[in-house]
Image (cartoon, coloured by chain):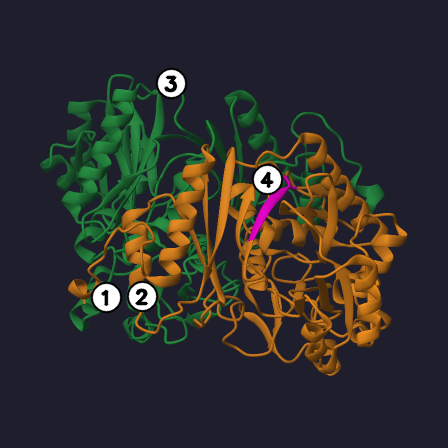
Chain colours: A green, B orange
Amino acid sequence: MDPRTGLPVVGMVGGGQLARMTHQAAIALGQSLRVLAVTADEPAPLVAPGVDIGSHTDLAALRAFAAGCDVVTLDHEHVPTEHLRALVADGVTVHPGPDALIHAQDKLVMRRRLAELGVPVPPFAPVNSLADLTKFADEHGWPCVLKATRGGYDGRGVWIVRSPADAQPVIDSGTVLLVEEMVAMRRELAALVARSPFGQGACWPVVETVQSDGICVEVIAPAPDLAPARADEAQRLALRVAGELGVVGVLAVELFDTGNGLVVNELAMRPHNSGHWTIDGAVTSQFEQHIRAVLDYPLGATDALAPVTVMANVLGAGQSDVMPIDERLHHLFARLGNVKVHLYGKAERPGRKIGHVTVLGSELPSVRRTAALAAHWLSSGRWADGYDIHAGERA
Amino acid sequence: MDPRTGLPVVGMVGGGQLARMTHQAAIALGQSLRVLAVTADEPAPLVAPGVDIGSHTDLAALRAFAAGCDVVTLDHEHVPTEHLRALVADGVTVHPGPDALIHAQDKLVMRRRLAELGVPVPPFAPVNSLADLTKFADEHGWPCVLKATRGGYDGRGVWIVRSPADAQPVIDSGTVLLVEEMVAMRRELAALVARSPFGQGACWPVVETVQSDGICVEVIAPAPDLAPARADEAQRLALRVAGELGVVGVLAVELFDTGNGLVVNELAMRPHNSGHWTIDGAVTSQFEQHIRAVLDYPLGATDALAPVTVMANVLGAGQSDVMPIDERLHHLFARLGNVKVHLYGKAERPGRKIGHVTVLGSELPSVRRTAALAAHWLSSGRWADGYDIHAGERA
């Protein structure tokens, strides 16, 4: 309990953009998020005052951090399970708890559990050798998908392999792997839900996510042309997974839409890129909802504020001669008055997520075009539609 | 320029809820608001890392603070004009500047200037003695309104006087005063605009503000049953005042709607209670717009997100046996899933603004009822509609 406010203290392990945006949402609830960050220049420490500097792999740092919190939650999946168990044994409230989180940390554990529950997943098998892989491929065909069981993100830790020769270097690397059938899919969807310890669940409209090189670049809410029965199925599936696994907080269920049905791809137990649109586009954002859930507050309404919301990620500039981000912002605002910008305070590296933009509206094509135009501009300092900026004249 | 982000640094003098909510908005723009606060437990220092502790009346503290900022702006009107002039003479960019701000600091200066500009204001006169007052009242009638030229807020510094005897103690107090005719009005409105140094202006829909004991308790956006021509007149008036006075940032023009026309009551040159609804209810909030304006970024769209938005202030509990704020929040969220809550982290005192709630919808009566119900509950721990909470059973 914070004696200054009379409110419980939420601490988040990890200082990335998710913690940054969670702090932003926390402010409205009278809170100030406490953060355990590795360095002081991460996105969250730049904007939050209650920061401990320390590693999420250092149990002593975790314990010292947890001592100042009523509940501990997570910006990422990289806290060792045994450390979370130690905190729980200390009496710390950790949401999501280690028994739930393991399903977002270890893809093989997740696959086995979801299969047990009868949730649709692709055929899969653990891979300890090339023989394991070829046995699987003989049955399910090439190409197939090798995945690191732990630690992958944004397309890292995923390899589409077309032959044993393709797979050999991955297997030789010593990474712990599983193999999955490559699902023939029309598109990717995400069902985002939140669950409280009390057991209340809430789901946002199901969205379509668009990836490029394994990185999510665009989210469309609601997913266009999704049959209501299919959307309902996705939401029920996500709520059921949240309940069965005992998730507390936000759960993102990434799905393949095969055209004939849904297959679960990945789980994330924290605010998720597929839910960034909710900051501007829903009554309750995923960040506020996550705080409400981990505090066991009743959950907020998840209705969309507009018929269509599109979120596009802003990736770091690929070229070194790009105009400064401050000037890119000026020009963006000068041209597009209705784009909501979210910058994370991160140093730019090509392909790194440094922010996102959100556009609300009623006509999907124009909303989508505006969001893409804005994100591309902020990423590159170049308008994708031929509009020209004589940047040199300003300087 | 913050070398960590490549973005200019905005500093706000004053650590109240306006600075708190400005910081919240700043986060999305890649910023972290710097704050000069008197104490570390004010609303903004509780949530922002870049805080100097010092008084806004201490020029040395102001200078040290300004040295770390690219632009300095204000959470309140209490910085002495001569200190702002000293900062400007030092080369500091101050928005709004002292020549504009004086019109929000000194009601007599404001009244004279607006009268010169032909902007409708009530008849007024300076009051140095009881004779000055009775001379004015002989001409304009009793009751009339005595106002402290400086420092009043939330009904303080305003006295409705019905006779010389009524006025005598106020005059004897030595407060510098003016007198105004008491305007016969139907209701109060507010026209909120923003203006950038470049000269761009933007206005939000005109709102109705409802006061109780001189404190704003409710804001309805847009103002119900306001003729489009009258709304247009209010917006043009506010934009003209912003331009003529050289305001940079948000300007709130409080208006009396007499039924036959508009009369200016007060000016505020900062985010204002009448604009809190924009956080949840408009594409660009007044807090984001204020930052954009003081940075000379192009301004954002001001469209409302719903047909009706109602904001209600949460005042500190009047009774000492109220249930803790954390439990009040639980119960609020359990009953009303679509209310947006904003708490300021302030200690409760009866009548003190400790937060606000916002509700969006399409039917004014139900939206208004929900907002009032929620604000009353958070203020008092009692449902105003007879709904009962057995608070004792939970503890």
- Work out whether mark 2 precedes mark 1 in sequence or the reverse, and give the earlier one: 2
Q: What element does badge 4 sit on? A: loop
Report if the CB atoms under discs 2 and 4 are less than 8 Å apart: no
- Work out whether mark 2 precedes mark 3 in sequence or the reverse, and give the earlier one: 2
Vertical comparison of B381 with A5: above or below? above
Relative depth, front residue between A360 and A87: A360
Which disc number belongs to residue B223?
4
Q: Provide the residue span drawn in magenta.
A: B204-210
Relative depth, front residue between A191 and B230: B230
Q: CA distance from mark 2 to mark 1?
A: 8 Å
- Do the residues at pointers 4 and 3 share their chain? no
Quadrant (top left, top right, bottom left, bottom right) of the C terminus of chain B: bottom left
Q: CA distance from mark 2 to mark 3?
A: 44 Å
- Do the residues at pointers 4 and 1 share their chain? no
Q: CA distance from mark 2 to mark 4?
A: 55 Å
Q: Position of residue B24 (x, y in %)?
A: 53, 57
Q: What element does badge 3 sit on? A: loop
Report if the CB atoms under discs 4 and 1 are less than 8 Å apart: no
Look at the image and tell me whether residue A167 can be seen: yes
Q: CA distance from mark 4 to mark 1?
A: 55 Å
